[in-house]
Image (cartoon, rainbow, N blue to C red):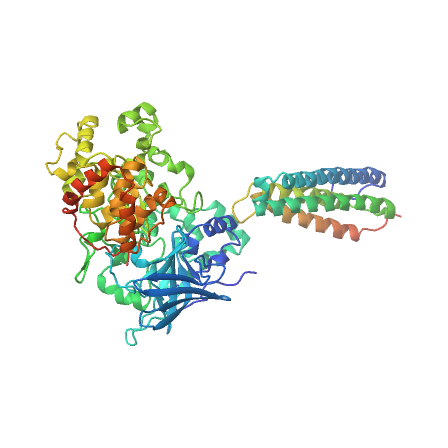
Amino acid sequence: MRSEYRGSRAGHIDADYIDSKNCVVCHAGHYDSWSRTYHSRMTQDAKPETIQGDFDNRIFEYQGITARMERRDRVFQMTFTFPDGRVESSRIARTVGSRRMEQYVTEQNGQYLRLPVAYDLVNRRWMNLNGSFFHADGKDYFGLRTPWDPNCVFCHNVKAQPNYNFDTKKFQTDVAELGIACGACHGPAATHADRAASPFTRALWRLSDQSARDIVNPTKLSPERSLMVCGHCHGQRVPQPIDRIREILGRGDPYNAGDDLAANFKPVSRETKVGDYSFANRFWSNGSPRLTAYEYQGILRSACFVRGEGPNRITCLSCHSMHDGDPKGQITAENRTNKACLSCHKQYEAQANLIKHTGHSAGSDGSLCYNCHMPRVVYGVMSVHPTHEITIPDPAVTVSGLVPNACNQCHLDKSVNWAIDQSKRLWPARFVQTSPSQDPQFNVAEGPRSLLAGDALTRALAAEALAGVGPGRPDPSWASAWLVEALRDDYPIVRFFAANGLAPMWTTMSKPDYLNPADCLSASDRCRLKLDRLLTERMANDAPMLRAKRPNVDIEVGE
Amino acid sequence: MTGKIDGNDTPKIVDRIAKQGWVSLALWMSVGLLLESLMAYKAPSYLNDLQRRELFRLAHAHGSALALLLVLVAIWIRTVEVKISGLTVFALRFGAGLLPIGFLTAGIWHPEGDPGIAIWLVPVSALALIFGIISLSISKRSS
């Protein structure tokens, strides 16, 4: 007979949570599908079976500091040698992330710290975290060595309890389970598991509704509560009221899946301030999120949520599926088509209506709903993502608030004013009041304009788009000329996308280290010699004017 | 059905038990062949569903074993010449027939983590079988 789960952790706020291994007894299929997701491996104890980074005595040099990554039997270690000869070693205790980047956490006197060197799983190389966040060159090497206990722990594990002692100023962190496991979305399951031990109870459950089962199923919740389950982590938030931070750090996260998130937290917005700290830079000027982990805010601002009613009100699960499809994005193949949108907007099932609505030919990227209504204007973990604020494309937002518009995400070689003219032609009723801008920068092709005149995040998005990663596939010889220019940027993350977009160049010369500005400058000079002379002259003409418009804004991502 | 079986009816009853045994044996061995084919051709609907695999195997194993049991019962009744009641015969034939069918149908459709509703045939059939075997074991010789 199965053991009793209830009360096994009495006195803790996760008293009724159970380890996901206990769920496999009945839910083997769901356990398997969850095991394939990146959620399941979000936080792991450091072991040879879990670590993906190359610890085979590798060296990574940056800002004069040498990091050596070594493995001794089952122990992984990072050793930093400073220019003055000082040596500092950190044993890897845990890893965070398993898809794009593997970050490392070390333990010092019971306190967990994120190390500043991480492994780029896509490009298979070591990097300093300064290369993934938005800071200009020169950011302190250890600037992103931040405590794990009051930060990462909340969203990368189940039921975080930092147990901060305000007298000793020490954390004694505990979690119900490392990683984003069953409890994160289904809540405490001890009662459910205890009752499920009886075959008669299970037989009765088959005949009754969800509420009888003592477990949360996000697909059965109201759209608002279902969104909150995901929004708990995919919607950066502050305690509500703010001074509850003492309770949360002292005892733990009060939220359980299925609860009213708003009773405990408030999603941050462009207007949110904590003391003097403002979150404004994490949002575009119109309030739309521009970083990942703000998807909840995006959906809450979308007409599909605001105006949707009953089963037609959008939730995360309208498109995403936690137990089906590709673990990358957790979307089924059919939901990568227009299917999810057409379930409500049925009028566009007819191809003629779709063509008339989009102004693009059927089957083209321009006829995929999300390319226009969810443009790729969000940055997170060294990649660019579709926004989750579902909007009507409007090129004028670039003029009014320097917000990237959907049209020029593909039409990179066309200006914003061109996009405004086309919008007036294709959708005259909607754009009757819109006029082209008199500012000459908006007569320049938007790819190069945003690459040179935008703030760091806009420039990074432009570099990625010019590299042809998104739906816009610009002429490579034209785009390369501008990407070569972007190698001269003073933000490593912009150079990262530019260097990746110039892959054909690196067949005849070495790929520069994007973290090293001198290396990138030298590579840019060498690449310029290979460019079309007319293009180089054009750049020399436009670049100073565009750079003069550039705002320099540091953005701290997600901390 | 429930009364004592007349001595003249015994050969008929024995034949029926033996016939059900041999037919069941042929049927459940064929099911075994089918299961091997599903494995040989890597049928995902069988191989990827552990619950279904378990239930189908149980159906095959119990079906074959209980078919042999019926044959043995028929031989034993004829050899030892015991007096058995109609209820005993019914319990044995009902239990041996429905128990593997319960496993099989519970595996064809089932919710995650549990067998299908037809699994309830298994305990009912098992009780009938146990009753049949006990009453057979305490049956008196006809002479």
- Give the percent coordinates (x, y) of residue B126: 67, 49
Quadrant position of residue A357: top left
Q: Is residue B21 left or right of residue A123?
A: right
Q: Is residue A445 above or below residue A274?
A: above
- The answer to whether one can see residue A13 in this image is no
Q: In the image shown, does A262 or A524 lie closer to the viewer? A: A524
Determine the image quadrant of residue A179. bottom left
**Residue A316, image quadrant:** top left
Q: What quarter of the picture does the C terminus of chain A occupy? A: bottom left
Residue at far left of view: A438
For the N terminus of chain A, give its image quadrant. Answer: bottom right
Return the x and y of residue A441 as percentages of the image width and height: 15, 39
Query: Residue at left 73%, top 39%?
Result: B24
Does residue A282 appear in this view?
yes
Q: Is residue A426 above or below residue A460?
A: above
**Residue found at the very far front of the displayed protein:** A529
- Residue under the image location 22 percent in, 35 percent down: A534
User: Which residue is outermost to the top?
Assistant: A352
Q: Residue furthest bottom?
A: A168
Report the number of discs: 0
Residue A384's x, y, as percent?
A: 31, 46
Instruction: Please name whichever residue, A288 or A3, is drawn nearer the observer in this view of the structure.
Output: A288
Residue displayed at 37% across by 64% down: A67
Q: Position of residue B112 (x, y in %)?
A: 52, 47
